[in-house]
Amino acid sequence: MHILLVRDAQSPVRQIEVTPRRVVMSLLVVTFLLMVLNLGASWLLQALGLQSESVTAAQTLSESMYERKLIELESQIGELNARLKGLDATRQQIIQGQPQNNNPETPLPLAAPPGSAPQNPGHAGGQGGPMLRAPGFSSDLSYLTRLHQLESAALDLQAHSQQVGQQLVALQAYQAATPTGYPLPYQAQMTSAPGFRMDPFTGQSSWHAGTDYAAYPGTPILSTGDGYVIRAEWDSEFGNLVEISHPGVNMVTRYAHADQLYVKPGQRVLRGEVIASVGSTGRSTGPHLHYEIR
């Protein structure tokens, strides 16, 4: 391949022959010149202090951003740890309950869930396991590695916190449904305990399934736990009768010989809610409340 170069009509024509070797040599020369120019520009920027300042500023900005993120995650982990401690403490209080007393204004203790292991308050339990170094972050770890570790720890704590929160809600529902409240607004005299007794009408030995409390006519009768009314009707033996089913604890409470009934079958009632008033209906010798758990 030939290239003809003509300056003007009077100048001689110059002829240049283009070969592959000459093209490769030209490309190598151009590449070398570009490299030299790039190195020269970098040296000039470094000499003037422009490049180091920009790199230092970018590095400082990146480290500051990571530090801020690390501080936020550490604060979040601290809050989750505090919440977990509070949830665990509340859960233990619900499981263990409070000591029983005779003060009607003080809530009675929570009964242990069916099938649960008995609590031994006099035994603190044991501990064990291998001796390991405390987990921590090495000083030579990068900000990104620490950031990932803290994010994983925060997610684990968040999942554990949600699990404990769900268990706490279930325990609180179980506590509310367990009929451990008092069926009257004040401490009343017990006139008949559960067990064998002399029947007040026939004088013969008979079984009494509940507890009779002497009370003034019209005294409010209170539900002893959350549940649903399954009976609110007249009974030939118990007179005006209310029965409440307590879901989750497999118990039914019975309130008998009432004067007035204030609830209906299917109605949901809460602990301490007024469901009837004391009377002497049915097979009764005087105003009282027959209370029974079965």
Image (tube, rainbow, N blue to C red):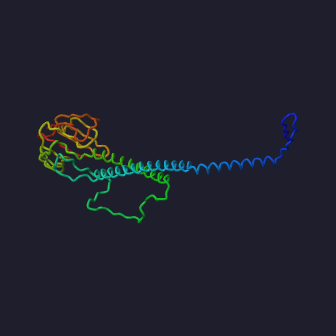
Residue 8 appears at what percent x and percent y? 85, 34
Position of 6 with respect to 116 (left or right) is right
Query: Could you say which is closer to the camera, residue 10 or residue 26?
Result: 10
Residue 195 appears at what percent x and percent y? 18, 51
Residue 283 appears at what percent x and percent y? 15, 40
Residue that appears at 22% across and 38% down = 273
- Asked whether residue 126 is in view, the answer is yes
Query: Could you say which is closer to the camera, residue 249 or residue 3?
Result: 3
Position of 238 with respect to 168 (left or right) is left
Query: Could you say which is closer to the camera, residue 111 or residue 161?
Result: 161
Figure disc tally: 0
Query: Could you say which is closer to the camera, residue 107 or residue 290?
Result: 107
Position of 154 with respect to 56 (left or right) is left
The answer to which quarter of the image holds residue 133 is bottom left
Q: Residue reaching furthest bottom?
A: 131
Residue 32 appears at what percent x and percent y? 71, 50
- Asked whether residue 191 is in view, the answer is no
Residue that appears at 41% across and 51% down = 74
Q: Quadrant of the N terminus?
A: top right
The answer to which quarter of the image holds residue 229 is top left
